[in-house]
Amino acid sequence: MTASAESGARLVRIRGHVQGVGYRNALHARATELGLFGWVRNRSDGSVEALVAGPPAAVEAILEWARRGPPAARVSHVDWTPAEAPAKAGFHREASV
């Protein structure tokens, strides 16, 4: 299975107390469980950014999860914009930017 243009890809930015609480690893695990494609990374401004693509219901599920995050996280805001689906399969942790 590969990501397609119809996948409903989103570039997501999560703000709040989301670094140092396992947010990135938890999002990676949840996205993998949902069969999504893309990546997740920490940003230097303290936010977490993710590119998520896959079946629309799975993308919506990860967006809903992102509003809560793992137990130690305190999410204050989640923004997303439409995006191009990633070229490579799987869900990956990317280097911080």
Image (tube, rainbow, N blue to C red):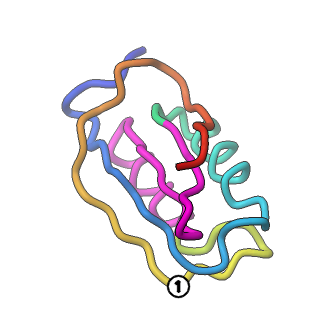
x, y percent for residue 92: 59, 32
Q: Is residue 36 left or right of residue 85?
A: right
Q: Is residue 10 left or right of residue 71?
A: left
Q: Secondary structure at mark 1?
A: strand
User: What residue is shown with label 1?
Assistant: 76
Which quadrant: the N terminus? top left
Q: Where are the magenta residues, as a range?
A: 39-66
For image coordinates 34% across by 51% down, the residue present is 11
Residue nearest the viewer, comparing 97 with 93: 97
In the rendered view, would you say 76 is above or below 94?
below
In the rendered view, would you say 53 is above or below 5?
below
Say whether residue 75 is magenta.
no
For image coordinates 30% across by 42% down, the residue present is 9
User: Which image quadrant for residue 51?
Assistant: top left
Q: Is residue 25 left or right of residue 96?
A: right
- Mark 1: give few (<14), some (14-19) or many (20+) Cα within 10 Å: few
x, y percent for residue 39: 51, 38
Q: Count of labels shown? A: 1
The amino acid marked with disc number 1 is Ser
Residue nearest the viewer, comparing 67 with 51: 51
User: Which image quadrant for residue 53?
Assistant: top left
For image coordinates 60% across by 39% down, the residue present is 95
For image coordinates 69% across by 60% down, the residue present is 23
Q: Among all residues in the image, which is located at the extreme top? A: 1
Residue nearest the viewer, comparing 13 with 2: 13
x, y percent for residue 73: 71, 75
x, y percent for residue 27: 63, 52
